[in-house]
Image (cartoon, rainbow, N blue to C red):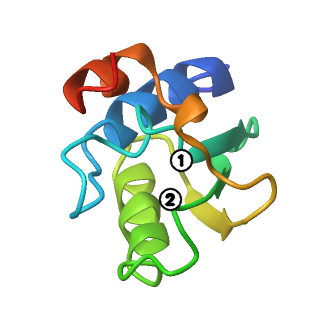
């Protein structure tokens, strides 16, 4: 029996960690903004995150995936993380959570 957390438990911890990663230009975390498209966790603790940014011209485009990977890799049980940046489908405000919309005054 392994002491390794289940993929589901790791996924929950990853979501919590991502809620502490902020786009420096927007006072809302990347998860609530809807920038995280997928989180795949395997039984060995390897994580693949697919994410986007609010715009291809985002000034922190090179830094955000690094920040996301660092947040994920600090979790006990995560062996390594890969972050893929995608532009398909494009991000829209509809991807934001209700919490993010309230914080940004869209509701």
84 up-or-down from 27: above or below = below
Q: Position of residue 86 (x, y in %)?
A: 72, 65
Q: Residue at x 63, y 50 (%)?
A: 91
Query: Which residue reaches farthest right?
Result: 88
**What is the total number of numbered labels drawn onto the structure image?**
2
Q: Can you give x and y, in whole percent of width and height, for residue 12 in the image?
A: 49, 22
Residue under the point 73% across and 40% down: 40
The Cα–Cα distance between marks 1 and 2, rounded to whole angstroms, is: 7 Å
Label pair 1/2, CB-CB below 8 angstroms: yes
**Residue at mark 2:** 54
Taking the spot 40% from the left edge, 46% from the top edge, the residue there is 30
The residue that appears at 36% across and 82% down in the rendered structure is 59
How many residues crowd mark 2 within 10 Å: few (<14), some (14–19), many (20+)? some
Q: Secondary structure at mark 2?
A: loop
Mark 1 vs mark 2, foreground winner is: 2
In the rendered image, the quadrant that contains the N terminus is top right
Above or below, 26 relative to 105: below
Image quarter where the C terminus lies is top left
Residue 92 image offset from top left, x and y in percent:
60, 44
Ranked by sequence position, the earlier of labels 1 and 2 is 1
Which of 91 and 1 lies nearest the eye of the viewer? 91
Residue 35: image tag: 1
Circle 1 crowding by C-alpha within 10 Å: few under 14, some 14–19, many from 20: many
């Amino acid at each position: 029996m392994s002491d390794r957390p289940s993929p589901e438990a790791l996924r929950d911890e990853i979501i919590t960690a991502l809620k502490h990663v902020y786009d420096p230009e927007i006072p809302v975390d990347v998860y609530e903004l809807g920038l995280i498209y997928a989180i795949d966790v395997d039984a060995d603790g390897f994580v693949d995150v697919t994410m986007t940014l609010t715009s291809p011209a985002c000034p922190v485009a090179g830094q955000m995936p690094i920040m996301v990977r660092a947040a994920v890799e600090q979790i006990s049980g995560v062996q390594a993380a890969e972050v893929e940046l995608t532009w398909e489908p494009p991000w829209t405000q509809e991807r934001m959570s209700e919490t993010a919309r309230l914080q940004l005054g869209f509701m």
